[in-house]
Structure formats: C-alpha cells, structure tokens
Amino acid sequence: MAKFHTLTICLFVFLLLSCSKGFNTTTIAFGSCSHQFDSLQMWDNVIAHDPVAWIWLGDNIYGDTYDMDEMKAKYDMQKQRASYQRLLRKTKVFGIWDDHDYGINDGGSSYTMKDESKELLLDFLDIPENADVRRHSGAYQSYLIENQGLTIKLILLDTRYFRDSLNKNPQPPPVYLPRNDGTILGEAQWQWLEKELTNSTADIHVIGSSIQLISEEHGYEKWANFPNERKRFFDLIVKTKPKRLIILSGDRHIAEFSKIEPAGLGYPVYEFTSSGLTHTWSGERPEANKFRIGKLMVSKNFGIITINHNNNSININLTAYDDNNEKIGEVVAKF
C-alpha cells in the first residue's frame, strides 16, 4: 500500500512538471501616487517580484507648483531615494503623469507650465533626448516590451496636456458632472493611438491611463466625465481589436479590478487600478462601480501583472499587493 502511495505521488509530481514545462514567466509591476516626502516607500517589495518593467501611472511626485525649480527638487528627492535606485538598477522604468506631477490638482490644458513640466517628467524617466515624445506636444508614448518570446505593447496615454476643463458641480457629490463636448486626449493623440493599435501584432496590449477609464459612477476624475471620449475609446478598440487588452490606471488612492465587454469586440477588457504607493483613504467607505470584479481595496498598494507563457498559451494574473507585500486581491484575466 505504501509503495502504491509513493508511486501515486511520483506520478502527480511528474504530471505537474510536465504541464508546466516550457512555460516562461514575465512580470510587470506598476503603481501611482507616491509622495516624495514619505519615507515609507515600497520599492523593495516591488523588487522582490523581479519585474521586467515598472510603470508609473501618475502622481509620481506631488509637485503642485508653477515653480519648475521646486518641481525639479521634488523629482530629485524621489529619484535619489536609495530603494528606488535599487529598482532602477534592476528593471526598466516607464511612466506617464497625472495631475500632481503635471503641476496642478485636477489640471488640464490650461496649465501654463505644461511644456516645462513635461521636460522634467521625461528627465525623471531618463527618456533619451532623441525620443519621439520629446518632439511632440504632450507626454504620450509607446513601447514594445519583449521577453522570452512574448511581445507586450505598452501605450501610455496623456490625460492632462490636452484635456478640456471639467464640469464642476458646486455642491458635491458628485464632484464633477458629465460634459458632452470637449476632449481628453486631443485630436493628434487620438490619431496616434489609432495608428498604434491598427494591425498591431503584439501578444498583449497594455494601455496606461492615469485616470479610470471603465468606472462610471464615482464623482471624481474619470473618462466618464467626457462620455463622448470614453465612447470613442471603446469604438476604437472594437475597430482595431487589439489582442488581450489590459488597462492600467491610478489616481484614486485605492485598488480595484473592473471588466467590460464592449459590443462587437468579442472578448472582455480588464482595468486594473492601483493607486496609493504612500497613502490611501483614511477609512473604508462604499463606492459604486457596476464593472468592479471582487472588492474595493482600501490600503497602500502596488500592482503586479504575471504572465505565464509558451508557444501555445498565455495566462495572465492581475494581483494587488499591500505595503506588507501581502496579496490583497487577484483576478485571472480570461480572453
């Protein structure tokens, strides 16, 4: 009987190893909302996951100024942190801004220092002087991340530089009401985005938007404040049909997963919001999101995308971790 039990265990282990044989793992980390004055940072937790890339989703510092010397000093403080330097030595860093590193809370196209602020952002990210993003208005960028036979197209959208003014409700909540005219991306960025998605052969498409794209119901900044822009985004996705689309967002000082199934696309689109590298809500409170999968996570957090892949299969897990490097939420993305 003992011999049979031993043989059974050996067979199980053999099958397990056989099933996993040939799989590679690619890990991408991301997050947002990191105050440069906060000494309690999570960079060593991020490093422990051995990501091939780190993606900033905005509020990379809290600049909130028209003084670019002050802004640069805050970027320098963030960048010179020893734990962040360890991350820079181990992985490639990408990023886009949100409002506080743009320069003004909930700011848009009217911010007068946006070109000067853009250069400081790109310097912080070590963007080469000859890069395309240095030559056009706005900070939108795209990259191919290639690892062990897998190709990921990373598209970082600029939701600040071109965005028209918000329709503010004088008696919140909600803080902002929908505006049926106006733009978030601006026409040049829209045309660029369509070119990036059209006939893309990447295995996975990751689109970074500093503000939430799928969620509609809360009263703060989101794409749904410009419903025609949000509709245009999903119309473009249906038209171009990029494979395995994951949206990353920040801004909210919480973490959550959302999923939508646009008519005519044929597969779901997932959004992973990870926000609050150094701070989060003062306490839990209910917030509606009809697209949410699982729970709203109110704690300091960062996001991990784990991709197990071989020539025949790609499996994607989206996982939120807290400041103890403990898993607080996970979704298996099924396309």
Image (cartoon, grey):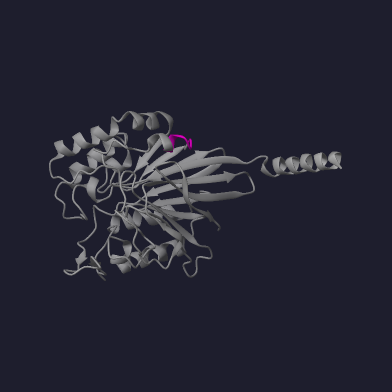
The quarter in which the C terminus is drawn is bottom right
- In this orientation, which residue lies closer to the viewer: 94 or 319? 319
The quarter in which the N terminus is drawn is top right
Residue 271 among those drawn in magenta: no
Name which residue lies at 42% across and 68% down: 290
Does 158 sit left or right of 292 as displayed?
A: left
Q: As displayed, is residue 335 above or below residue 102?
A: below
Which quarter of the figure has residue 163?
Answer: bottom left
Residue 187 percent coordinates (x, y)? 29, 59
Q: Main secondary structure of the magenta part?
A: loop
Residue 127 percent coordinates (x, y)? 32, 36
Which quarter of the figure has residue 162?
Answer: bottom left
Residue 145 percent coordinates (x, y)? 46, 41
Name which residue lies at 66% across and 42% down: 20
Does 14 sit left or right of 258 as displayed?
A: right
- In this orientation, which residue lies closer to the viewer: 210 or 300? 300
Segment tinted magenta in the rendering: 46-50
Residue 132 is at least partly visible in this image:
yes
Residue 48 percent coordinates (x, y)? 47, 35
Q: As displayed, is residue 82 above or below residue 15?
A: above
Q: As displayed, is residue 172 above or below residue 296?
A: below
Does 229 sit left or right of 321 as displayed?
A: left
Residue 201 is at least partly visible in this image:
no
- In this orientation, which residue lies closer to the viewer: 327 or 185? 327
Name which residue lies at 50% across and 39% down: 146
Does 260 sit left or right of 232 as displayed?
A: right
